Amino acid sequence: MMVLLATLMIGSAQAQNTTNPTPRTITVIGQAEQEVTPDIIYLAISLKEYFKDSNNKNKISIDELEKQLYNAAIKAGVKPEDFTIQNVASYKYEVAKKKKDPGFLAAKQYRIKVSRLDGLNELLEAVDAKGIQYSNIDGFEYSGKKELEKQLKIQAAKDAKERATYLTEALGEALGRAMSISENGYSDYPVVQRTYMAKTAMNEMAMEDSLDIDVKKIKMAHQIHVTFLLQ
């Protein structure tokens, strides 16, 4: 009886291996990419208090400088919620020994969200130049990123199926259903070719007449890895 049972079990296992062999598959990578121009730009601007005279009197306060910057930003079309304070700090004002020590002066860093750069000169020129420590581009975004990512994934999936189809046909095979799908995406954000450094109390050079910033496009790309059965 035990010999007969063992024989039946071996026969059953052999039948399963015959009816369910290891599936034959093909794995391909579909790709899709597109370049877009950033339509959201973040500016970083730092303001600091300073004295108008050499005797450390008549201080230009950070509140006054902030009001100048805020009003100029709103006039340029910036929404109030897109004008934010990133940091508050203080710094020591260097003075000669005979002059009164003014102590620490306040400084603030701001982040301003804009949709274009052609009005940046006018915005900065509305602020007392000696109160500007620096200004530069802090980041970029594309408002249609989410929808574009979706479309790129769809295109990459279709590209994967097209690749798998012509490869299997070239080998005289037939393409079956997809067994597994994985994705990988990336965005190549632009690099600002030139940043703007405004004059400060230590730098009395004239402010530039124009701001020449070359913003590269964002390249967004997606890859879809798909494994198909071969029929």
Image (spheres, rainbow, N blue to C red):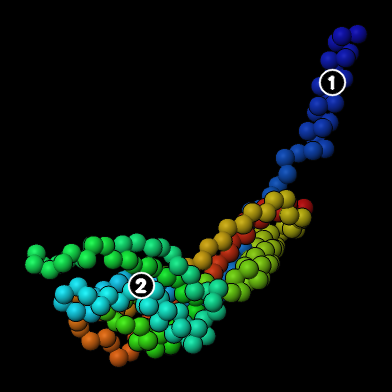
Question: Which type of secondary structure does the marked residue at label 1 adopt?
Answer: helix
- The front one of 119 and 75 is 75
Nearer the observer, disc 2 or disc 1?
Answer: 2
Q: Position of residue 4 (x, y in %)?
A: 89, 13
Choose the circle earlier in sequence order: 2 or 1. 1
Q: What residue type is disc 2 on? A: Ile
Quadrant housing residue 119: bottom left
Front residue (pair 15, 146): 146
Cα–Cα gap, marks 2 and 1? 87 Å
- Marks 2/1 in contact by CB < 8 Å: the verdict is no
Height in image: 15 above or below 39? above
Residue 215 seen in this snapshot: no
Residue for point 35% across, 87% down:
125
Q: Residue at x 18, y 64 (%)?
A: 101
State the mark number for residue 9. Answer: 1
In the displayed structure, does residue 62 sit left or right of residue 221? left
Residue nearest the viewer, comparing 48 with 150: 48
Q: Quadrant of residue 223?
A: bottom right
Q: Is residue 113 left or right of residue 99?
A: right
Residue where numbered disc 2 is placed: 62
* Residue 181 appears in the picture as rendered: yes
SS for callout 2: helix
